[in-house]
Image (tube, helix red, strand yellow):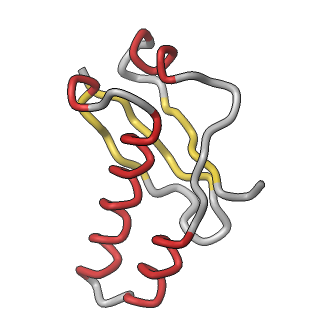
Amino acid sequence: MQATFCLSSDLFNGFKVSINKDTISDMDMVIDAMKKQLTQKLEEIGLYTLSEKARLKNFHVHSYRFEDVLSANDDKIWYICDHC
């Protein structure tokens, strides 16, 4: 089962990743996986400055809990933001 996460961000808005629910145990793992995939993609195309900015962002969630992610249908998109 997969969960899809999308960034709500001034620089990285719309970046999405799907993560296997069996490989995560809390929201910190989700945010770390999101950040890792984002920085890898940016570095693959030579955007090292943006990669560094992504590394420094304080990504976080509002209005849902990790348990909500685990129990939801796979077609739901969960948002992670950096604007607060």
Q: Position of residue 36 (x, y in %)?
A: 32, 61
Judged from this view, the residue extending furthest toward the right is: 84
Looking at the image, is 48 positioned above or below residue 67? below
Who is closer to the viewer here, 79 or 22? 22
Q: How many numbered marks have been drawn onto this rendered protein structure?
A: 0
Looking at the image, is 49 positioned above or below residue 54? below
Residue 44 as seen in the image, left or right of residue 13: left
Who is closer to the viewer here, 35 or 72? 35
Q: Position of residue 34 (x, y in %)?
A: 39, 52
Who is closer to the viewer here, 76 or 64? 64
Residue at x 57%, y 66% (from the top left corner): 57
Residue 12 as seen in the image, left or right of residue 2: right
Which quadrant of the rendered structure holds the N terminus? top left
Looking at the image, is 75 positioned above or below residue 35? above
Looking at the image, is 45 positioned above or below residue 58? below
Which quadrant of the rendered structure holds the C terminus? bottom right
Image quadrant of residue 29?
top left
Judged from this view, the residue extending furthest toward the top is: 71
Residue at x 37%, y 64% (from the top left corner): 38
Residue 57 as seen in the image, left or right of residue 16: right
Image quadrant of residue 5?
top left
Residue at x 49%, y 71% (from the top left corner): 54
Residue at x 63%, y 60% (from the top left corner): 9
